[in-house]
Image (cartoon, grey):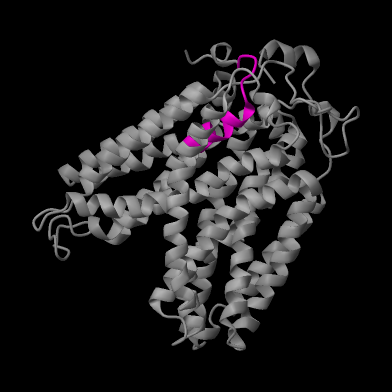
Amino acid sequence: MATATATGTTQLHLILAWGFVGIPLAWGVIETVLNALQLFQ
Amino acid sequence: MFSRERIIAWPGFSRWMVPPAALCVHLCIGQAYAFSVFNLPMTRLLGITQSAPDDWKLTDLGWIFSIAIVVLGLSAAIGGRWVEEGGPRKAMFTAGVCFGGGFIVAALGVYMHNLWVVYLGYGVIGGIGLGLGYISPVSTLIKWFPDRPGMATGMAIMGFGGAAFIASPLSVWLMRQFSTPTHIGVAETFVVLGLVYFCFMMVGTAIVRLPTPGWLPPGYVPPAQPTKLITTRHVFVYQALKTPQFWLIWWVLCLNVTAGIGVIGQASAMSQEMFPGRVTVTAAAGFVGLMSLFNMGGRFFWASISDYIGRKNTYFVFFALGFLLYATVPFAGSSGSVGLFVLCFCIIISMYGGGFATVPAYLRDMFGTRYVGAIHGMLLTAWSAAGVFGPVLVNYIRQYNVDHGVAKAQAYNITMYLMAALLVVGFLCNLFITAVNERHHMVPDESDAVGMAD
């Protein structure tokens, strides 16, 4: 991954791109995990 | 702006920008799995607190999702070649317009209280967006990750499985914001979702790039000789339909999906009926959420594993392990082991998701990279067929048992054994898959004439 980012794509580009999709997904997963925990209560 | 030539990556472009581009699309179109959150509110659009005589019926509303899934399969099959030859940006843009636009037309249908307009909007127009969007990034990811094609497509298709996690709470929150004591805010929610999803998908459209022809990842050396089940040649999309391998993989996918999809819709009721008094409605909802997590995680996990153990072996694991797990479920029920029941279904559902995510790489191994997206589109008709087989098998067999005096706690046993039998058939189909005969391969001149980067 590091070799491919030597010139064109910066680490910031990667963080922004992955954050753009990762943050909403992480939020949804956390919400679901919290609901799923009710199975064990 | 949209042509393949205009989106060739510049030197230094990181291939790790492409999975987020694909996820921008799949995280949106996977909303379809969460469409059921609108069903009950849409039965009270006129009556508000309870259904009025002229309100839509739940059975009529169920068709919205069904139409969307059928159109998904058809548009992926019919539009696959156009997606492959037009390039991922054009396809992702079109998918965004259709999916976002479908919501807007559906909002108009809700506003006019005309269900046919909703069918047209979300079902047909949105369904086209679903189909084109689903296959649009697949071959691009495979070309960027020739060393890890399973992992790459697994990431995108994982997004499709995880989209409902976002769509479901977001839709409920939006409806709450737009609702008043005299109005249910479904139409406004559709408009907002349509605009948000369109914008989100346009970000993916802007990011996506194709590799230059002949590009390989640094340090990656392709095998000098093709292995037995991984070709270095290409098969034309319509020629693939003439191979037994396509139809065997079609059945492999169909049977794997049938086994999983049948229990997804019934998971909540099944857990409560098999463990009466021990699994409450709230706990059952938690079980459904847990299964969704395994559905999503399995897509990435199994597709990534397939890069190491091979696609054929991965499906052997699905069918053999699935057979054992389905056969174990009745024992879990009779012994009252909720933990064993939950464990069985979580692994089964992970393999259901894994089947979706591994199949693009399986097709790439068999038919090459040139038309893999289009061939994948054709294969998605197996999903449509499984969407009918699975629920019908589970629902009707359960009802037949209940009608003939079988206790509800045992009513699913025959279904579980039938699912296990289906997996044996899938195992045999997978067993018969061999390399595609060379007469089906495109000749080199023919491949070059298409002029695509791969």
Count of marks overlaid on the render:
0
- With respect to residue B16, does B258 lie above or below? below
Residue found 14% across the figure and 64% down from its top: B49
Residue B16: image location, x then y, percent: 61, 31
Residue B241, magenta (yes or no): no
Q: Quadrant of the C terminus of chain B?
A: top right
Q: Position of residue B388 (x, y in %)?
A: 51, 56
Left or right of residue B261: residue B211: right
Considering the whole magenta stretch, tell me its main secondary structure. Answer: helix
Please identify the quarter of the rendering in which residue B145 is found.
Answer: top right
Placement of A2 over or under B278, stated as above or below: above
The magenta span reads B9-24
- Residue B16 part of the magenta segment: yes
Residue found at x 78% / y 57%: B428
Q: Nearer the viewer, residue B12 or B327?
A: B12
Instruction: Tell me if residue B157 can be seen.
Output: yes
Viewer-closest of B79 and B343: B343
| B15 on left or right of B44 | right
Residue A14 at x, y = what percent?
55, 31
Give the residue at x 36% y 56%: B36
Q: Residue at x 59, y 76 (%)?
A: B341
Q: In the displayed orientation, state which residue is furthest to the left.
A: B182
Q: Nearer the viewer, residue B406 or B207?
A: B207
Q: Residue B106: x and y, percent?
A: 27, 41
Residue B76 visible? The answer is no
Q: Quadrant of residue B142?
A: top right
